[in-house]
Image (cartoon, rainbow, N blue to C red):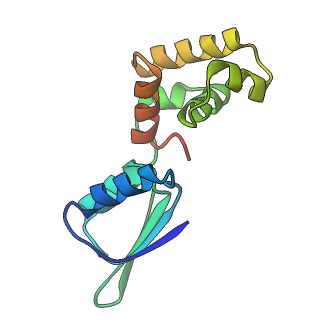
């Protein structure tokens, strides 16, 4: 989805994110003439795929999602990242197992390893960590 918003003022990023989450549509790209850095960071950190802000007089700044900076995120295996993406999609261990052709117990083991590596206690915290560190691209 491509969103065109003429201008994002202070706090508008949070409002936009809440609206998109209600509609389950955070997979979007934002085009705007003017947006503050804080608003762009809020949007990109909340799941918006990218943003383009053109600022007068004709300068264009293209911003993508931030790259993972955490040491723990670089330690996650491709399989663990795949499991984490499916958790973020709201799937149960059984559904993830069926999708990846694994047992639910193996999925549970992957989640335990992810939890240890990133220092989180539950699925919601794992997903929040993944969003903050741009692991769900």
Say which quarter of the image contains residue 133: top left
Residue 119, position as x, y percentages in the image: 39, 18
Quadrant of the image for the N terminus? bottom right
Nearest the viewer among 76 and 1 is 1
Which residue is at the far right? 101
Q: Is residue 112 left or right of residue 61?
A: right
Residue, x 56% and y 47% (percent of image)? Answer: 137
Residue 125, position as x, y percentages in the image: 40, 26
Q: Please say if 74 is above or below 17.
A: above
Nearest the viewer among 95 and 80 is 95
Say which quarter of the image contains residue 88: top right
In this view of the protein, can residue 67 be seen by the observer? yes
Q: Is residue 91 left or right of residue 56?
A: right
Q: Please say if 105 is above or below 123.
A: above
Residue 104, position as x, y percentages in the image: 69, 13
Residue, x 59% and y 35% (percent of image)? Answer: 85
Q: Is residue 31 left or right of residue 41?
A: right
Say which quarter of the image contains residue 20: bottom left
Which residue is at the far front? 22
Residue, x 65% and y 16% (percent of image)? Answer: 107
Which residue is at the far left? 10
């Amino acid at each position: 989805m491509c969103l065109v918003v003429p201008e994002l003022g202070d706090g508008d990023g949070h409002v936009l994110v809440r609206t998109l989450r209600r509609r389950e549509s955070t997979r979007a790209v934002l085009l705007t003439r003017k947006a503050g850095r804080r608003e762009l960071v809020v949007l990109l950190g909340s799941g918006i795929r990218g943003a383009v802000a053109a600022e007068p007089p004709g300068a264009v700044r293209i911003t993508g999602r931030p790259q993972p900076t955490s040491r723990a995120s670089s330690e996650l295996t491709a399989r663990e990242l795949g499991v984490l993406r499916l958790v973020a999609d709201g799937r149960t261990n059984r559904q993830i197992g069926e999708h990846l052709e694994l047992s639910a117990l193996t999925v549970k083991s992957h989640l335990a390893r992810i939890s240890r590596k990133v220092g989180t206690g539950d699925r919601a915290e794992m997903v929040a960590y993944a969003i903050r560190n741009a692991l769900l691209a």
